[in-house]
Image (tube, rainbow, N blue to C red):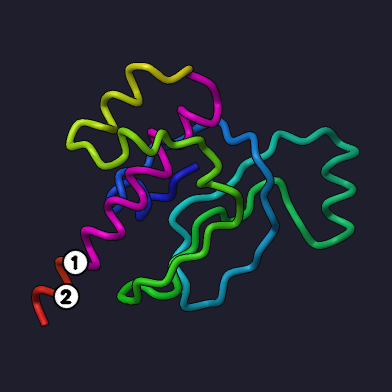
Amino acid sequence: MATPIGQKKYGLPNSLTYGCWFEFVVPSVSAKVCANYRIDLTETGIEQLSKHGLSGQFPAVIQATENEPTFYFAGDFAENPVVSFTAKMSFGKQLNRLFSKKNEKTIFFDTFYTPLIENILSDYYSNQLKK
């Protein structure tokens, strides 16, 4: 689940299925959470997580501070086979989307991870030009 910051600033979708490993993290007070995981839990699951001070919603993408380009991804977001032949082509991304199998990993990579990275790098580059 993207937070309003994640949706507005980084173009993240409101919700999306994620099927790889993740970890529970607690951000610092000054950190900005850009996206959260949300797990639908049974009563037993709620009890088990509660024993450890955890809930079914927790940070997935954390930015150190609003103006600092340091991010933490609490999962294996980049796990997606990228075809190296098309990676350097100007329309490589579109070709890969056209010919790749649509599954959880590729959908997550194309609609969450790629826009997130592109927007982080774009922001960083823009800020460097202003200096």
Up-down relation of residue 66 to residue 87 (above or below) = below
The verdict on residue 103 being magenta is yes
Residue most extreme to the left: 130
95 vs 76, nearest the viewer: 95
- Label placed on residue 15: none
Q: Residues within 10 Å of mark 2 (few under 14, many from 20)?
A: few
Can you give x and y, in whole percent of width and height, for residue 44 in the image?
90, 38
Question: In this orientation, which residue lies closer to the viewer: 116 or 28?
Answer: 116
Could you tell me which residue is drawn at 42 percent across and 37 percent down?
14
Label 1 to label 2: alpha-carbon separation:
5 Å
Q: Residue at x 47, y 72 (%)?
A: 31
Start-end of magenta stretch: 102-124
The relative height of residue 83 versus residue 115 in the rendered view (above or below) is above
The residue lying toward the viewer, choosing from 121 and 57, is 121
Mark 2 residue type: Gln
Looking at the rendered structure, the secondary structure element under dot 2 is: helix
The crowding category of the residue bearing disc 1, from other C-alpha atoms within 10 Å (few below 14, some 14 to 19, many at least 20), is: few
Residue under the image location 76 percent in, 57 percent down:
54
Question: Number of numbered discs present?
Answer: 2
**Three-letter code, disc 1:** Tyr
Q: Quadrant of the C terminus?
A: bottom left
- Residue 9 drawn at (x, y percent): 28, 54
Residue 83 is left or right of residue 80, and the answer is left
Are the residues flagged by discs 1 and 2 in contact, CB closer than 8 Å?
A: yes
Q: Main secondary structure of the magenta part?
A: helix
Q: Residue at x 29, y 32 (%)?
A: 93
Mark seen at residue 125: 1
Q: How far from the left and from the top, in percent, is residue 126?
A: 14, 66
For mark 2, what is the residue? 128
